[in-house]
Amino acid sequence: MADRGRTRPRRFRSVRARTTLGAGVVVLAALVVGAVGFVVVLRLVLLDGVRTAAEAGLEQVSSRVESDGAGAVTDYEDVLVQVIGDGGSVLAHGEDADAPALSTADESRWSHDGERWLLVSDDVGLPGGGEATLVYGVSLEQTDTAIRTAVVLLAVGVPVLVLVLGVVTWSVTGRSLRPVERMRTEVETIRAAQPDARVVVPDTGDEIARLATTMNAMLDRLDRSAAGQRRFVSDASHELRSPIASIRQHAEVAAAHPHRTDVGEFSDVVRSEAVRLQDLVTGLLELSRLDEGGTGTRRPVDLDDLALDAVARARARVPVGATGDSTIRVVGSGISAARVLGDERLLTGVVRNLVDNAVRHAASRVTVALVEQDGAAVLTVDDDGAGVPAGERDRVFERFVRLDEARSRDAGGAGLGLAIVRDAVRAHGGEATVTDSPLGGARFVVRIALGG
């Protein structure tokens, strides 16, 4: 039973049908309410006119009875007129108002020969003395006929009007949605082999045109994303192939000439290429996590602690020259306290990647600074290396990009470190940029809002 309920097609699925049904129901309800109100008002107006006519006739007849006596009413026809005495007897009546006595209640209804009448009454004085009650009635036939005619016309007119409205709404809605259906058909035909295909934007300037423009913009973004994914897969495959090929080559040489193979040298090659593979896979996984969900659990992080730790780590890894001193000086004296709200693991990777990148490209000096500025923590990492050309400052944050000519000392890297920096900083709502450094090389700047 439940399966049948889920698979049974729903009625009025289309926008066209729902719009027509909704318009029809609303208009029908409005017309019914208006028709009922019209009939009620019409009835009140017509009854008020009959009442006014009856009261005017009563006043006229009262004057004649008071001057000429009860017999003055005998010649009245097409109206009901009776003079009723104190005992309820009919003293005189018009041609259409014979006995029995009419009701003396003012504004009462009375039916006679299938016709309804409105009765009004008043006390009158008779010429010979004494009093009587004069009853005067006016027919409601014309009023009832007018009301019945109005009801019939409305009962026929309202459904016809709703039907006409439904047809017009169905037609207009269909014409309005025709461009949407055309766009749906065009989008349905777009395939991966036609990445540059787009929908036609109608020259109307309305919501449909804006929808087509937005759809084309979405297709542009999807095209760029797909191209980026294809490039990413191609670059990743190339980068993974290189260390695997190196390990395989040395293994084949060792197998073919075991007596000429130095085990220590072979072990060093395998170890270094394995580390390279590990770094590459780790970077790819990090970028994949950033693409899928951004940051993990956020909590207050002391960014200055991460910066000082990265400086100490870089100092320990800097090569030592012939004199026993470090070939590159890493300075962290410009680091001050700053706390942000974020993922400590990602932020640690951001700071370490920037410092390690600067050490690889520096000639002799790297400086790291951290300050609070305009509600943000601003981390700057400077080196005195070759710098980044102005035309490459956006591209340097892309994946698998290595500026070999300007950064010739970047040996062995896969070009993922700065891409991880940019994506991780963006996941924290910040920005990462590169400019010229006062030291002569590159200055990488990271801004993240303060928090915690």
Image: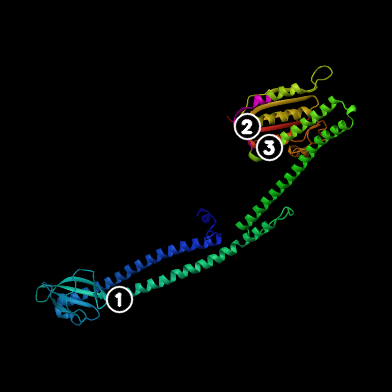
How many numbered circles does the render carry?
A: 3
Is any part of residue 282 visible from this angle? yes
Mark 2 and mark 1: span between their CA atoms?
Answer: 88 Å
Question: In this picture, is 138 found above or below 427?
Answer: below
Q: CA distance from mark 3 to mark 1?
A: 87 Å
Question: Residues under labels 2 and 3: Cα distance?
Answer: 13 Å
Q: Which residue is mark 2?
A: 343
Q: Which residues are magenta?
A: 294-307
**Does residue 375 appear left or right of residue 147 in this picture?**
right
Residue at the location (68% across, 25% down)? 307
Chain-order first, disc 3 or disc 1: 1
Residue wearing tag 1:
141
- x%, y% of residue 86? 11, 72
Q: Residue at x 75, y 21 (%)?
A: 316
Question: Which residue is drawn at the image coordinates 17% and 80% (left, top)?
Answer: 72
Foreground: disc 3 or disc 1? 3
Residue 2 left/right relative to 392: left
Q: Are discs 3 and 1 less than 8 Å apart at CB?
A: no
The relative height of residue 320 versus residue 222 in the rendered view (above or below) is above
Q: Amino acid at mark 1?
A: Glu
Three-letter amino acid code at the position of disc 2: Asp
- Label 2–label 1 contact, CB within 8 A: no
Label 1, secondary structure: give it.
Answer: helix
The spot of residue 115 in percent (x, y) is: 27, 76
